[in-house]
Structure formats: structure tokens, C-alpha cells
Image (spheres, rainbow, N blue to C red):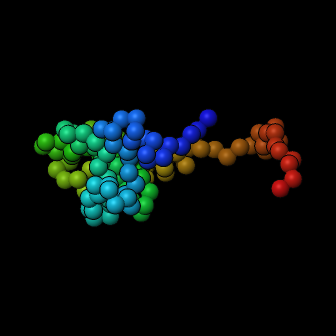
Amino acid sequence: MITTLSVQEAQSDDPTEKILLAPTDPNAEVTQITGYKLVYIDGACPRTYRVYKANSMIGVIFQHLTHWSNAVDKIRYAKSVDAAVGLDDFMKVTRISTTATEQPPTEEELLDKEFDCADN
């Protein structure tokens, strides 16, 4: 069962816990970089940011004392934009390789599938 909490309920449980704010929320700590928005989540070292591109979250990057990194490779980047681009490039390649390796179902597999005859 999925339940939703109001902001008030979420804050009453633990007032020190931060709520993950959307990049459009006025209370969110948002950093604009070329082509991306970084939204601070938490942490001191490393600081953790969600990365948005065209209003869609593509992943997470981390700000360390001496470098930036992302959640998909082991590369140390000098700038936040480089870590975001590395993450974005990885996600593009993953989508392409997943699409290329997926085989469409055979006619026999389609005929074996159950379907719902409910009136719409």
C-alpha cells in the first residue's frame, strides 16, 4: 500500500530530516549549470546532488573536496558540468544498448500471452 504524507506530517516525525524538494520548489537549493539543474539533497563531504535535464532527473552526482563524481563511473571530474555530462552520456549509451539488445516477442509468444477483455 502506498501512502502519501503531507509536508506537515513528514516534518513532525523528525524536524531535522530534509524532504527531497523538487527543482521548482522555492526552498530547494538549485544550481544551474550549462544544460542541467543540480538540486542539493544532503551530505557535507561528499555533497549529493540530483541532476535534472529538461525537467527529468537523470541521476546523482557528488561534490568531494577535490573533485566531482557521478553514480555510474569511477572517473574524477574537475567540474560539476563534466560529472553531469558523464552521467548523461552513460545514460544515453545504456538506453541505446538496452534497446538494441531487446528482441521483439515472437508470434508464438504473443499468442501465449493472456489479455484482459474488459470493456473500456
Point out residue 84 in the picture as x, y percentages from the top left corner.
30, 53
Q: Which of 105 and 9 is in front in this view?
A: 9
View extreme (left): residue: 66
Where residue 44 sits in the image (x, y, percent)? 20, 40
Q: Is residue 106 above or below residue 26?
A: above
- Give the residue drawn at x 50%, y 43%: 5
- Horizontal side, residue 1 vs residue 86: left or right: right
Q: Is residue 120 above or below residue 115?
A: below
Foreground residue, 11 or 62?
11
Q: Which residue is drawn at 27% across and 62% down?
A: 32
In the image, what residue occupies the spot 49% across and 51% down? 96
- Looking at the image, which residue is at 38% across and 58% down? 25
Give 34 or 43, whichever is nearer the viewer: 43
Viewed as shown, does residue 110 lie left or right of 92?
Answer: right
Looking at the rendering, in which quadrant would you find the N terminus? top right
Q: Can residue 79 be seen in this view?
A: yes
Number of labels in the image equals 0
Q: Is residue 108 visible?
A: no
Q: Which of 28 and 115 is in front in this view?
A: 28
Quarter of the image that includes the C terminus: bottom right
Q: Quadrant location of residue 108?
A: top right
Tell me residue 115's x, y (percent). Answer: 82, 43
Q: Image check: 68 left or right of 5?
A: left
Q: Where is residue 97 in the image (x, y as percent from the top left)?
A: 49, 47
